[in-house]
Image (cartoon, helix red, strand yellow):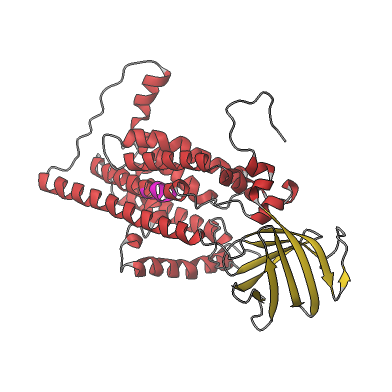
Amino acid sequence: MVTKNKYLLRFLVLFIGLITIPFPFNLIPNLEFVQKSFFGLYQKIVPWIGDKILNLEKPITIIQNSSGDKTYDYVLLLILSVIAIFGTVIWSILDRKNRDYEKLNYWFIAFTRCYLGYFMIYYSFFKIIPIQFGEIAFWRMLQPYGESSPMGLAWTFLGYSKGYNLFIGLSEFIGGILLFHRKTKLLGGLILIPVTVNIVAINFFYDVPVKLFSSELLLMAVIVVAPDLKRLFNLIVQNKPTNRRDLTTPIESRKLIKGINILKWTFLIFILYKTIDHTTQTYKTRQNKSELYGLYEVKLFTQNRDTIRPLLNDEKRWRYIFFEYPNTIQFSRMNKSRYGLNSKIDTVKNQIRMTEFKDSTKTYNLNFKKTDSTLNIYGVFRKDTIYCETKRLDKKDFRLTSRGFNWINEYPYNR
């Protein structure tokens, strides 16, 4: 960040400050109310702005899901950007003194480094411990490429390789850790710029709904490196010697410096502990599998004592049955449609109790008989008496998960 451009600095201070609220208070135990207060305010203002000022055709709905690119998010970003612009104008009018803004610039970049470093460390552990993309689900293994969404294709690609996840995660982690020390912050920023560029590219080109947030992280990585851009340009592009950067802090009090360092490293240890604890607990939960875990291909299906032939467009006949996560069973029909139900498996009585997702009063009790390679299910399901014989498949039965890594390839194995 170049302090000579005071207008840009003022805008960035306001803009980054607004989009990062309520950090770091949202990380501190018993201060969750700060985040709830801000979000509660936003959830009142944003829909009103969308309706009364922007005249949007559809009302803005506030939905808590994994998308960060909802209409709500774009309108909120617009509001914060406008506030930052007006704030910059007012600030510039009121503050006409010839200030150097060195201290403001120092604290602004320090805050930006902490915010960026926290999220890089946080997301890195979701890749180092393979959680974010997860294991490729059974239904995804059976899904034709053409029926996958761009995001689904990206998630399958990224989730396939634990090694690639580890590579990305370590890049994020190392870059994030380096941001917390003045002598290594430039190296951390230089590592994180290509890392975040890659994240932004995937989000944009594969339609992953985290475009806004990832772009904001990329902007912060650029801000961290910005004070050294001239030196880097002279060294890398013009092949000229560059001056040594003065890394001294504008803080004069040694006690204050010592206190800040203690606070900084305490914060780093805290977020490491909190992130590791959260990701490991999540991973343990994800490791829980159904008692009948597996993918079962339906070989024989009878309904009300009539054998149903495996016709491709049949809307009722099951083609596959999936048992992946606890308390859930999924069915794939011959027409490629898929649906699931809540399930509870009794391995003593060999029974499956199933409940409709949308109507808990509708329950079905089916019996099953299982061997290492087969699963037979029978009983009354949705008013029909069914009998089903299946063959168990394993993920090694698919080319994607059986090919593995090969040092030597006499011919390209591109299937």
Q: Is residue 90 left or right of residue 289?
A: left
Q: Is residue 199 left or right of residue 191?
A: right
167, 232: nearer the viewer: 167
Q: Quadrant of the N terminus?
A: top left
- Where does residue 350 sit, x and y in percent of width and height? 64, 73
312, 51: nearer the viewer: 312
106, 159: nearer the viewer: 159
Q: Quadrant of the C terminus?
A: top right
Q: Is residue 122 magenta?
A: yes
Q: Tell me if residue 91 comes above or below residue 371 in the rendering.
A: above
Residue 99 in which image quadrant = top left
Residue 37 is at least partly visible in this image: yes
- Where does residue 293 sit, x and y in percent of width and height? 61, 61
Residue 414 in which image quadrant = top right
Could you tell me which residue is drawn at 37 percent across and 29 percent down?
229
Q: Tell me if residue 222 comes above or below residue 51 in the rendering.
A: above
Q: Which residues are magenta?
A: 118-123
Q: Is residue 330 left or right of residue 243?
A: right
The kind of secondary structure the magenta stretch mainly shows is helix
Q: Is residue 128 magenta?
A: no
- Where does residue 379 sit, x and y in percent of width and height? 75, 77
Could you tell me which residue is drawn at 64 percent across and 81 percent down?
360
Q: Tell me if residue 65 comes above or below residue 2 in the rendering.
A: below
- Where does residue 398 sit, x and y in percent of width and height? 69, 46
Residue 10 is at least partly visible in this image: no
